[in-house]
Image (spheres, rainbow, N blue to C red):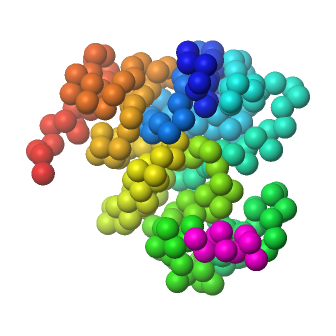
Amino acid sequence: MSQDALIRVEGLRKSFGSLEVLKDINFEVNPGEVVTIIGASGSGKSTLLRCINLLETPDAGHVWYHGEDLTGPKTDVDTLRQSIGMVFQGFNLFANKNVLDNCTLAPVTLKKMGKAEAEKVAMEHLDSVGLADFAKSPVTSLSGGQKQRVAIARALCMNPEIMLFDEPTSALDPEIVGEVLGVMRKLAENGMTMVVVTHEMAFAKGVSDRVVFMDKGIILEQGAPADIFSHPREARTREFLARYLDEPAD
């Protein structure tokens, strides 16, 4: 394991009741790297992501961030979590607030940023996702794709060092998936460290530095997109990718 890794996961295990969801996961993310996690539903992808920022508490193992053990008893998880942005499948926006207020709430309350500065930062990020004109709009008036772009802007307002995306397009209509993936592509091009759980194989193939394939609670294989998509070593990986690989090229 690299000593320079931004995130390092060692021996991670997680069960829900008698169901063992993660079985001895070892995994790392380096600064500036885009890692996509693929696999069938129920393979443990989202649970792994949620364990990285301790939204789920691991049963065993360690999550290291900059060499500090997030699972250690003295760790101030809330402070460290401010550096780890999270974008959820279901947006998780505050429905009773407008777009701008959703983006400024955390910087003002957690980082003690002044309201004017928080709004300036928020407008820059809303502009970067193409939603500056919607700053004063109620969240309830937005489309799913717009809500997810607001969620990305909101996470960026905390100036995170790494962004975690938990199936950010799976709740969206197919015709608006592209607008969210476009924002994520731009983040990757700008050097943001990202871990993305996704079923969007074209994104995984075209944007990732590394693809991780999970199956039944383990990392079955990982590697460069060209290797995973063109020369998968494991039968289960080949089986999972068969539908995608059999599609005719555009």
Q: Residue furthest right?
A: 74
Q: Position of residue 77 (x, y in %)?
A: 80, 38
Q: Nearer the viewer, residue 9 or 116?
A: 116
Give the image location of residue 63, x and y in percent: 68, 26
Residue 123 located left or right of residue 208: right
How many callouts does the rendering have? 0
Tell me where residue 37 appears, x and y as whole percent: 44, 34
- Asked where in the image residue 105 lies, by quadrant, the reply is bottom right
Q: Position of residue 128 (x, y in %)?
A: 49, 68
Q: Compared to 37, does 142 lie above or below?
A: below
Which part of the image, by quadrant, shows the N terminus?
top right
- Magenta run includes residue 117: yes
Q: Quadrant of residue 25?
A: top right
Q: Is residue 40 visible?
A: no
Q: Is residue 19 above or below residue 245?
A: above
Most foreground residue, 236 or 97 = 97
Q: Say left or right for 78 vs 207.
A: right
Residue sitting nearer the eye, 204 or 139: 204
Residue under the image location 81 percent in, 24 percent down = 72
The reply to whether the magenta stretch includes residue 24 is no
What secondary structure do most residues of the magenta stretch adopt? helix
Query: For residue 176, which quarter of the picture?
Result: bottom left
The answer to whether 40 is drawn above or below residue 153 in the figure is above
Which residue is at 61% across, 19% downward? 3
State which region is magenta: 116-124
Q: Which residue is at a point 84% across and 37% down the rendered structure image? A: 76
Residue 117 is left or right of residue 140, and the answer is right
